[in-house]
Amino acid sequence: MHLYRPEEECGIFGIFNHPEASNLTYLGLYALQHRGQEACGIVSSDGENLHTHKAMGLVADVFGDQNTFSKLPGSAAIGHVRYSTAGSSVIKNTQPIMVEYSRGAIAVAHDGNIVNAQLIRSELEAYGSIFQTSMDTEIIVHLLATARDDSLVERITTALERIEGAYCLLFLTESRMIAVRDPYGFRPLCIGKLGQSYVVASESCALDLIEAELIRELEPGEMIVIDKNGMSSCMPWKKVKPQPCIFEFVYFARPDSFIFGKNVYMVRKQMGRQLAREHGIEADLVIAVPDSGVPAAMGYAEEAGLPFELGLIRNHYVGRTFIEPQQSIRHFGVKIKLNPVREILKGKRVVIIDDSIVRGTTSRKIVKMVRNAGASEVHMRISSPPTSYPCYYGIDTPNRKELISASHSIDEIRKYITADTLGYLSHEGLTEAVGEENSSYCTACFSGDYPIRFQNMGRNPQLDLFEKEYIK
Amino acid sequence: MHLYRPEEECGIFGIFNHPEASNLTYLGLYALQHRGQEACGIVSSDGENLHTHKAMGLVADVFGDQNTFSKLPGSAAIGHVRYSTAGSSVIKNTQPIMVEYSRGAIAVAHDGNIVNAQLIRSELEAYGSIFQTSMDTEIIVHLLATARDDSLVERITTALERIEGAYCLLFLTESRMIAVRDPYGFRPLCIGKLGQSYVVASESCALDLIEAELIRELEPGEMIVIDKNGMSSCMPWKKVKPQPCIFEFVYFARPDSFIFGKNVYMVRKQMGRQLAREHGIEADLVIAVPDSGVPAAMGYAEEAGLPFELGLIRNHYVGRTFIEPQQSIRHFGVKIKLNPVREILKGKRVVIIDDSIVRGTTSRKIVKMVRNAGASEVHMRISSPPTSYPCYYGIDTPNRKELISASHSIDEIRKYITADTLGYLSHEGLTEAVGEENSSYCTACFSGDYPIRFQNMGRNPQLDLFEKEYIK
Amino acid sequence: MHLYRPEEECGIFGIFNHPEASNLTYLGLYALQHRGQEACGIVSSDGENLHTHKAMGLVADVFGDQNTFSKLPGSAAIGHVRYSTAGSSVIKNTQPIMVEYSRGAIAVAHDGNIVNAQLIRSELEAYGSIFQTSMDTEIIVHLLATARDDSLVERITTALERIEGAYCLLFLTESRMIAVRDPYGFRPLCIGKLGQSYVVASESCALDLIEAELIRELEPGEMIVIDKNGMSSCMPWKKVKPQPCIFEFVYFARPDSFIFGKNVYMVRKQMGRQLAREHGIEADLVIAVPDSGVPAAMGYAEEAGLPFELGLIRNHYVGRTFIEPQQSIRHFGVKIKLNPVREILKGKRVVIIDDSIVRGTTSRKIVKMVRNAGASEVHMRISSPPTSYPCYYGIDTPNRKELISASHSIDEIRKYITADTLGYLSHEGLTEAVGEENSSYCTACFSGDYPIRFQNMGRNPQLDLFEKEYIK
Amino acid sequence: MHLYRPEEECGIFGIFNHPEASNLTYLGLYALQHRGQEACGIVSSDGENLHTHKAMGLVADVFGDQNTFSKLPGSAAIGHVRYSTAGSSVIKNTQPIMVEYSRGAIAVAHDGNIVNAQLIRSELEAYGSIFQTSMDTEIIVHLLATARDDSLVERITTALERIEGAYCLLFLTESRMIAVRDPYGFRPLCIGKLGQSYVVASESCALDLIEAELIRELEPGEMIVIDKNGMSSCMPWKKVKPQPCIFEFVYFARPDSFIFGKNVYMVRKQMGRQLAREHGIEADLVIAVPDSGVPAAMGYAEEAGLPFELGLIRNHYVGRTFIEPQQSIRHFGVKIKLNPVREILKGKRVVIIDDSIVRGTTSRKIVKMVRNAGASEVHMRISSPPTSYPCYYGIDTPNRKELISASHSIDEIRKYITADTLGYLSHEGLTEAVGEENSSYCTACFSGDYPIRFQNMGRNPQLDLFEKEYIK
């Protein structure tokens, strides 16, 4: 049987009514590459047919041959980048998914995670549907194909009524592009304009790259339909309290993006300042674990009145598939990404800022590396609360057993990572840094307060690993 | 006829007497990837035969398949990364070059540029030598093959007596590894130890990655021979005044490397401080053109007492081959690498720090980008003097006609890049930042004072482009 | 919308209960390569999962890498070779088709052509089925997936009740292999034994290659189920009068195969003898259009008492994809396959034997080629009646407009091909050569007597080209 | 050190002064594919530069992409096909070899084998020449590069004076094509005309394909120079008694070719007739081992008054690389190529005609196969004398230890291959079949009379395997 494979963090991009639609989608995906490095794809429409090109690999590799774009003609296109996850990574599990059904051709790109995917899939298969992939996104197209409604908008409405979980979706048909953000609004999605073209993207940095103007973010529960008559919007599903994912601010989004009403860099710097207020310590300098820790480290240094230095240099050619050398020299893992600058660290009391600690193994290696480079004291500061609960809405966290803070006290963690002191940003400090007016973020990974109940989730193997007592 | 193709900036790495020699060479090249992204290769020796694997592409791609290493057996290996240059980039022009001649097999990897390559090549061809590549490095192996000396060390000595220019070389035979740094010492080369193994690398960051200990840098004019009896050193060529390349500090080397007796990050920060002293201005914040401008920007901000901010976010997936989209949207060039953070820049008087200005086109785009993001004033500061002369010793500068500062005054450049003010670090300021004791760097790219005369250069087409009056 | 793409001539092979099932399937497909050169594939079962490898190309290319077989583990396997047809040749239209549906995984390989494919497909799509390919074979798996019967045998029975046309099918599940020959028995299918293993193949030559023993041919309308308990047989569909395809004897099958109760070579030689009796002529020698014309030519020569010579030499490296050179030299088409031997033909009265004339263009080139080589007279003899009607049961004939004998008299054809005389084997002569006891072959391509009516065929674009008056 | 690799049977083709030179060379190589299936290549000249494309594989695969020809521009081209030999088959050992030396660019294609290659190579390397391949053909270009003569014709004359062995050569420079046949004339080479273009090919069948007219064969020791002024000829080397290879008639050439003044098919048929006269036997029918045995079998049947039947059917998709399945089923070797027709052979006394017996293992399998198919008697007849001596002039025979007739009597061979009787064509019968006027063929493989002495052959490892007593 299929292994259930949740769609993890992804990036989506679409453009309608531009003579170089697939080219611009390529650029948009390029700007969203941080949301998924495993695979990518584009589907374009020339008004009569959909055309597709998908492959494992980075955007620049998959679309590196200029000829590719001649095979993606048309004035509308949607694209997708997928996060790197181990194991079941195969070419057929790439997006956008493109199918032909009784009403014609449709393509869909999905960022998020469907919680009740397995249950719906079993039901559809029992009635004779044949699935081609192990992606839960394919459920959506089968729900569309079996929906009896006349219009596509109604069929999408009917189909998504069945879906529980996090989803930002982009649909493309021969003549329309449709964007949907789920009622909780877990993941970001924004819309912009480039001349007479409409552009939809996971983050505003993709609009910046192609010099499109940001109109606004989609509302939670909003469906936007773009066709030759322009853009229209509706909110066809039951309203719920929005729960945007706070981890997008902590780690996932690009610092130059504007999401959930704020600039990510500014929020991160604010987290660093708050962290300095909560966990100040006497020290000589502040360094960051690059790159996600840099803005918080700068905020911390500013607030603490300490110099900020580039004490760890990142190898800029990492970030792409790195084949580890053989067993005996595998321990170079962290060194391949980071190298300490001995001249800066030698004899100094160093504060290191990182955004989170997952298993603790990387932090342990970094603390040791900094100490070996000559630091006299090493103080680890984390710009978010302990990550004690796995995410079911699209962030690729390991299951609870692997999360060090699910089973260890802060002092135990400190000992494990061999730091002199360790401080996490408090839950209150985090929400304050993000801004009080947004008190309703999804913070399930810190708190265990999951916005969606799990009664309908079927045979999710991830859940089997998840001890029931942790679901509050 | 062949088009003369100078070897440009490259990185070289070698290890002798380690059971996983090719694996560690792969890691070493990975750390040196910034010195060349176009192509790479490794030659290993198993004591009886040399084995080779070379291809166009990044290290992680070319050696991405773990099986590759089983085809590179043996306890010694040398590797090479080559810079991306346009046009004649073909697979056969990759290094290390490996040949079999009457004395057996030998491989060579070269960082630098041979000034009299064309002349020697013509001579060798006249006597019947057949060249397989258009790389000037191939001249060295033909000189070795025709040298009548008995020992390899003598043959290398004889061969290199003919060579003028910049060269760091690594030779590998079945039983020996030989490292050479040219008498001027233009390019850096260091030697380290990892257990019982000797390691040679262009920069110390490659030693750090594999946790080898830096012994020292090679002296200008030094040849080091490593074999089963250990390491020996000699200085067989006529001594000249060393002229290490100051541009390695300005731009080319990695900030965590230790070269020419100093840490690069520290030197760059010092350049920034000196720049602030020379060209201070009233402003609200300092930003850098990432990544090479960051240390200088931090030094400037510190000295000027201004906040340093990440006003330009770099897309970390650039740095690899990026296929430009078609003509009409090609102007996205700079945006693909950098995105401004509007929230930081809006309404602010901004100082931008970059390491150099070449053609001026990129600076112009950056100034406009920052102004479009809302900056009220834009002050450009450059952490080196105007680059007015091309380099013949391995740095890939354009010819003089394309260097904006060769033909324009500083104020003309300021107007062209549309900055409110523009300041370059002075020549004196640069050498002071580097440290007075090293008063004898090669600064030809700033001054036109070329250490090697050109009388013997033959048909170098690069020289044809170079007006005689500029050679002082 | 999909262009309807009929499955044309193909070859299928399966083996159950052999430790090297996929290896032997590869050999079996190799022997059946003449039935399809465009694409091929194998699906194997290891008892728990199905494994698949398919690609465009010849068997020896697609399975040329020995590692392939390690990815096709298990003791049962089925394979498929597909004929080369223009245009819609794409990788996804390769067989066996493998899907997962509510009852598990199933693979199917199909030789033949489904006449009512488009109709059923439209119906299935209306109820929400999503098709992944444009092959009509996919209909069968959707019918299986929507069938409500409990057992697989019943589901197959139900599904095939809907299907009209020609089909030899091989199904593979985790634990069973099922072979089906349609009630008309259009295409050949035989079963054999190799030790404890059962083998099914389109032609007996595939059994010969792996040294399996031929048990018997499947009966028209027979379904054979092979599992760990051995082999069982049933005839679940309504009985009709069998109509095996006489063109398999004329051209399609391999001469060493035993099909429809006879050896193909012997039948072809008999056709040649009969042809000599019907269309004898004074001549010096008999030559064949190799290779399919050779046995008939030998029979003709024997009966006529004339020497048989190899007057046309075939290039044995043709038979695989041949990329035609550019326009101006494209007329070399026939020369690439055949070269006349001048020394044999010079000054001679030559009888040329071919199996059929389709468009007439090739015959015309051959006649000219033989005459240019010096023949004084050229007499063309065809070992079958004029091919005046297209085939709807799997032979890749062009549509009726392109068949020269559909619109031209024999004398007109003779003039077109520039032969001195032209004689076709009579319809009676053909059936006599095949053997009177088999008076009920499908001879629709000669006679227009189609065994299956077309009322349900839906939007078959092939039919649109087919003038109604020709359907008797 | 290099393993010495003799150039084996090959095919060469060249054309001068045709707008589609590389296209026609592709066709010419296609017709010569039987002379080499391992690798192929084309070098074209556009008057200013040479262009090259070479790869492992069949002509139709290597040049399968029409775009290839746009990279081979110009009105002159030469091409090469290389025979499949085990082991050292690597891409760099493909031809034509193309180099640039002091006099410009030159390419060379070679059919034959240089006997003193190793000796000359060692000498050249001692003077500093660096070899890139292990092909002995490369020696020729180094001899050209070191020759001091002024004109190319003189340099070729000087270079080839040093060469001993068999060679047909085609040289191509920017402005000339030069064809050379060695003084012994071991291998065939002919020249033809196509309009205003000159064409050179190993066999006339390549001229036929492109509809070029055969002018004549090159004389042994002739050099033909073709340039914009037309064609000129000279005989610059010392005259020796010609010794064309009789094995070209027996096996290697295509039956439709005209070589050494005769048609190959006619000669083979004559061999069959002579064989019947020498070794007639009472039997029911004659079959051939296809395809090379067919003409002789037809001659034998004619002379013996027996029917000729296709008792062994060849799989026409063999002849290309066939990856053998794993160990346990490897014994299918011969069955993959040939399948007996039971209905023909059952109960019959069968004469099998083959062209030669090398190791005896294949003949043994064929005899068994025919007997298993029901033959009551099996009489093997060979249309050439026993092959007891290896070839040093280009035919890929195994070394003497593996040749069954070098160490076994005819009756021992008969027993080994399990035939009822065995008869070889006599040496006199062979030369009579070829024609008395050509009494001076090289028959070294049958007689051990090698035309060239071996005193200068150096370290040829093939010779080490060759016991001295066999050199008469």
Image: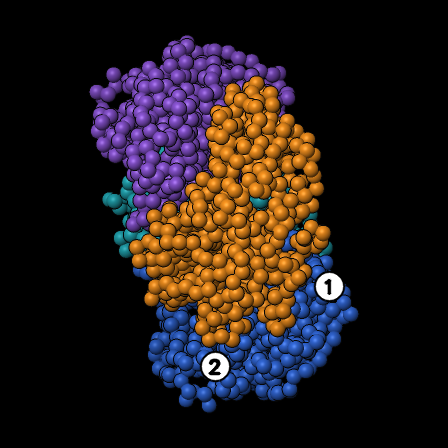
Chain colours: A blue, B cyan, C orange, D purple
What kind of element bears circle 2?
loop
Residue C356: x and y, percent? 58, 39
Q: Residue at x 75, y 64 (%)?
A: A195
Residue C3: x and y, percent? 65, 57
Residue A145: x and y, percent? 62, 72
Q: Which mark is residue A17?
A: 1
Amino acid at circle 2: Gly
Residue bearing the label numbered 2: A458
Q: On screen, B81 above or below A206? A: above
Between discs 1 and 2, the one toward the N terminus: 1
Amino acid at circle 1: Asn
Question: Quarter-wise, where is residue D84 in the image?
Answer: top left
Q: Is label 1 or label 2 in front?
A: 2
Crowd class of label 2 (few under 14; some 14 to 19; many from 20; radius 10 Å): some
Question: What residue occupies the far right of the structure in this picture?
Answer: A229
On what subunit does the disc labeled 1 rest? A
Residue B191: x and y, percent? 35, 50
Q: Residue at x 55, y 34 (%)?
A: C275
Question: What residue occupies the far front of the structure in this picture?
Answer: C436
Q: Residue at x 53, y 57 (%)?
A: C241
Q: CA distance from mark 1 to mark 2?
A: 41 Å
